Amino acid sequence: MTQPAPGTGHRPRQAVSTTDLPPGTGHRPRHITGATDVAPGIGRRTAAIVAVAAMLPYLTLKVLWLTGSSLGVSDPSLMNDPAMVGLNAMTFGMEAVGLLLALAFTARWGMRLPGLLVLLPLWVGTGLLSVIVVTAPILVATAGTAAFSGGPIAPWVYMMVYGGFLGQGAGLMAAFALYARDRWPAAFTTATGLPFPSPTRPLQAILAWGALPVAVVVGGARLVQALDGPAAAAAQSGLKGLLAIAGAVALVVIVRGRGGVPFRRPLAIAWLGSGSLFAWGLYVMIVRSVGGPLAGGGGGPADLVELFGMLTGLVMGLCGAFLLVERSGVRDVQPAQEPLEGDDREGDRRAADHGHR
């Protein structure tokens, strides 16, 4: 039994480490650190398996087309066009990277990958897939298979491809969210206004506030485009416009670093908004540059919107990268009881040697 300290008249307080408290007490550790060897849970494994299964038909089709097959194509010469060969090779490579990342989310070694190798392709991939996941069901619901008829590619190919995009988009984004929660828990447990050292904060403010008006103009132009044209194209343009504006606003919020809103909420919006701007703008610019059958229907103001969208998304992505690197050292400090408090929790936070001063 602990004896009273000489001259104090009461027992000395013992330091209580919250990491040693039994489960179910309502306490949690003062510091939550990223673990690089956390075994993936059943949720992450399941989501990644769904993504991989959805990718395999698309990859198989791309391999067939790249090796000279005309499966699902009424005009075999289409797949021999140099522009189509290049685009098929590019999209095959993108899908292969997504497949490797999905596999990484199911293994311990995936937690040890350099952050850039995970975040950069996922930022581009989720920017593309988030729009497809939302708008593809609208396309099928409004027009059915008739929306894919009339071209050189069979309607069942479109149905298979877009169905695969839905599965891999939902699976990959869910697996990545669970992976990021395990690897970078501070982003999921801290508030937006939690202070942290930020040497590049002035630069971040310039980039975020500078990107905001351009993103509003680009988003507004896409919303105007949504007012004209078929339902599927209108839905896609409208969603891109909303993501652009919301992402830019969310980036300003997290750069300012104020408020008690969980950091993960504005981060997710800024991530999708900037990724959508950059990824779709880059894709359109590549298609326009290589020419070929897919390059038609653009030009003029529409291409200008895509170009500025790509550049704005890049600036927003760089700003977010600076912020995430600096914030990566932030830890969650939300103890239910201070280590130097007694069991009565009266809030005594004085030093342990206060009785000898």
Image (cartoon, rainbow, N blue to C red):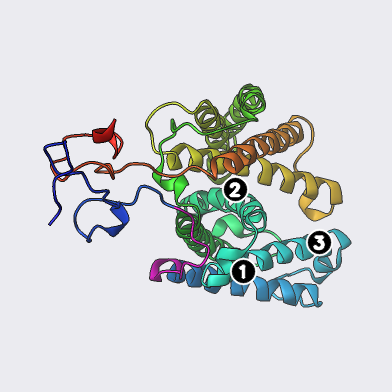
Instruction: Please say if 80 is above or below 197.
Output: below
- For the N terminus, the image quarter is bottom left
First in sequence: mark 3 vs mark 2 = 3
First in sequence: mark 3 vs mark 1 = 3
Q: Residue at x 41, y 41 (%)?
A: 190
Specify the quadrant of the image occupied by residue 20. Answer: bottom left
Is disc 1 in contact with disc 2, using a CB cutoff of under 8 Å? no
Extreme residue in the right direction: 82
Q: Position of residue 321 (x, y in %)?
A: 63, 41
Q: Position of residue 174 (x, y in %)?
A: 46, 59
Three-letter code for the amino acid on which mark 2 is drawn: Gly
Question: Which callout, 3 or 2, points to the residue nearer the camera?
Answer: 2
Q: Report the side of 53 relative to 44 (left or right).
A: right
Q: Which residue is mark 2?
A: 127
Residue 287 in sight from this viewpoint: yes
Instruction: Please say if 177 is above or below 258.
Output: below
- Secondary element under disc 1, as helix, strand or loop, is helix
Three-letter code for the amino acid on which mark 1 is drawn: Leu
- The circle drawn on residue 84 is 3
The CA span between labels 3 and 2 is 23 Å
Q: Is residue 126 magenta?
A: no
Q: Residue at x 69, y 65 (%)?
A: 153
- Secondary element under disc 3, as helix, strand or loop, is helix
Q: Which residue is mark 1?
A: 99
For this rendering, which residue is in front, 354 or 283? Answer: 354
Span highlighted in magenta in the image = 33-44
